[in-house]
Structure formats: C-alpha cells, structure tokens
Amino acid sequence: MIRILKSSSSRPWWRLNRREQTVAIVFLAFILAGSWLPGRITVATSGSLNHRVFFLLPAPAKVELGDYLVFGRQDLSQVQSGLRADHDQMLKKVGCLPGDQLTTDETHHFFCNGRLLGQALETDSKGRPLPRFFFNGPVPADKLFMVGTHPRSYDSKYYGFIDVHEISHQALPLW
C-alpha cells in the first residue's frame, strides 16, 4: 500500500518561501548563464598574446588602436599544421589603423607612426621559412594591421592587412 504524506504546512507545494525563492532564482540564473556564457568566452591557446581568456562581443562599429579582435583568414597554412582543418579564426590586437603611417625597414622591423610594432622573422621556431609582408605608406581604408604581443606572433607582419569586413568579434581580455 502506498501512502501519500501530506505536508504539515497548509500552503500548496508550488508556493515558495523567501529562501526557496532565492535558491530557485540563483539556480535559474546559473542555468541561463550556463547556456549563454560558453558561446561568449574564448581561450587563446597560442602564446602570441599577453591574455588567455576573452569575453566576446559583436564586431565593433568603430575599431580603436589596441582593440583585440577575432577575424577570419583563409590563408592560414602556416598555423594550421596540427590544428583542426576548419581553423580559420585568429585573435590579435590592432597595431595600426587606416590612415596611419606603416613603415617597414630593411631588417623587417614594422613601425606605426614611428612606434615599433615588432620584427618579421625569417623562420618559425622549427626553422621553416616564413612569408614576410613588406609595406611603406598609409594603411589603406577598411584595412587593419594586426599584431600579437609576443615576438614570435604570427600576425600581419607575415600575412599583411586584414579587411575590416573579416572581423567577427571584439574580444575583451578577462585574464
């Protein structure tokens, strides 16, 4: 025989006291955050940036110097070795904006308005030759020169400008 126990209180089971309401709200908040947050957080696995964890926002209407951006690239054969075949996104920092003066010297050092951005190396860490971009003049309209913060970062020093239409997200560093 099955016995149904009656609650000792006279309130219906769906009515919650203050503590139960707080627990329910916190629980629902965790469920909602758990379904929304994973698509908004990314982890940079390469050592080319000072930060590793980023919060993603939609692509900005106005790009500023120093912004971290996620962008698509179709010509990433240099970095795809050992990674997923569909890996076509990069996360770098804006080093030079449209209209800024980008110069490259004979030793492949890059400067934006006289500020050193880094040097393009001849080979990668395994001794394989790297393509090197060369440019002197104002950055063209709708183009950006992207840089990493590590001297060995594979960035615009090797593949050149990116088009602002290639930007998919702005990335805010969290850690």
Image: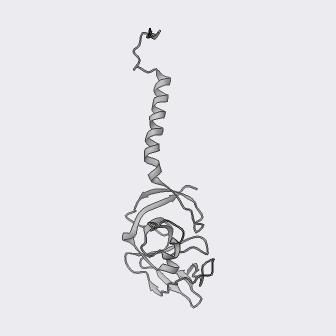
Q: Quadrant of residue 44?
A: bottom right
Q: Residue at x 60, y 79 (%)?
A: 124
Q: How many marks?
A: 0
Farthest front residue in view: 1
Camera-nearest residue between 43 and 65: 43
Up the image or down, 23 lies above or below 146; here it is: above
Is residue 133 or residue 18 the one in the foreground? 133
Here the colouring is: one colour
Q: Is residue 76 left or right of residue 150?
A: left
Q: Which is nearer the eye, 147 or 73?
A: 73
Q: Is residue 67 above or below residue 20?
A: below
Quadrant including the C terminus: bottom right
Residue drawn where x is 45% and y is 11% of the image: 7
Quarter of the image for residue 128 reads bottom right
Give residue 165's position: percent from left, percent from top.
36, 70
Task: Name the residue: 48% across, 79% down.
Answer: 159
Across and down, in percent, residue 160 comes to 46, 80
Residue at x 39% of width, y 71% of height: 164
| Quarter occupied by the N terminus | top left
- Residue 134 placement (x, y as % from top left): 50, 87
Using the image, determine if residue 116 lies above or below residue 93.
below
Whole-percent x, y for residue 34 in the image: 47, 43
